[in-house]
Amino acid sequence: MASFRKRGSYQWQAQVRKKGYPLQAMTFETRAAAESWARAVEVEMDQGRFVSRTEAETTTLMELLARYRDEVTPLKKSAASETTRINAMLRHPLAQRIVASLRGADMARYRDERLKQVQPATVKRDLVVISHLFEVARKEWGIPVHNPVRDIKLPPSSRARERRLKPGGPGQDSEETRLLKACCKARNRFLLPVVQLALETAMRRGELVGLRWEHVDLKRQIAHLPDTKNGESRTVPLSSAAVQVLRELPRSLNGQVFPGLTTEAVKLAFVRARRNARLEDLRFHDLRHEATTRLFEKGLNIMEVASITGHKDLRMLRRYTHLRAEDLARKLG
């Protein structure tokens, strides 16, 4: 049975009591809205499909994001970057909203607002995190919430990047030379060897940061990666230049090749070095593109390159391979 009482000048509280169900209460601005809600609850109770929405109606997106960050994110390989992403979301006004009130239109406004500030790929990653958050809340935390991200169109995937290091013109250093000179002057002492190894091995930033001496064999010129992005281990061959870079590094007591280094520290140091080298639109991941392309230029076939880079889908490997037309022309004769 539903009952209603006025609370102050502008609020009405509806209460629904039914045997076998906990008391349900909700406050509205008008009595009509309160009565409509109460009727819907009573119908669901009569039909045996009522699920208490109390938690969904009293929990903010901020609370769910914080819980997701603390319980789910640490289990992911991208934990560090996702934590940074979620912390930024927590500062957005949308985080103050009650999750039961969020609709597709709210997500669409968030999407469109963010698209004015950052790249579509960044917005898409934000929405993927929020979408998974709602699924976890519903399936594992027992919070009856609708996933509003499912109601909107995600931003399109960005086109594959084709950024390569450019050769220098007459009397000018190449971009690689300028980058390495800037890395030499970086406050982070590990930036230079990390960049050099990235160009020689096509390893990802996280793989380089996670290198351990016990997995490096300089005599056999290999580095074993027991845990990679795709969940499988692989062994990367080391060029003579890569071996030389590793030989010059001091050995740490904790066994890490780059002790204390984090992926975020590499990112920040690389951005500063890129800026000092006056290089436009160059990202650390572009070094993996460059290294992969160079492997093809050395004459390795696609299966050999895939075994080095760790790509399971050969179609994805094409996105990292950008052969210069002039080089192909020389091969054609």
Image (cartoon, rainbow, N blue to C red):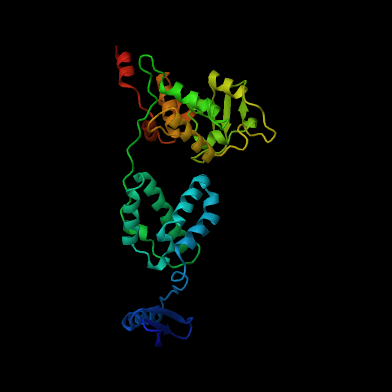
Residue at 46% across, 52% down: 88
x, y percent for residue 67 = 52, 59
| Residue 172 figure quarter | top left
Residue at 47% across, 67% down: 59
x, y percent for residue 291 = 44, 26
Most foreground residue, 18 or 72: 72
x, y percent for residue 207 = 53, 35
Q: Is residue 290 left or right of residue 211?
A: left
How many labels sit on residues? Answer: 0
Q: Is residue 332 above or below residue 228?
A: above
Most foreground residue, 303 or 191: 191
| Residue 52 figure quarter | bottom left
Residue 236 makes an appearance in the image = no
- Quadrant where the N terminus sits is bottom left
Most foreground residue, 71 or 88: 88
Residue 176 makes an appearance in the image = yes
Q: Is residue 230 above or below residue 202?
A: below
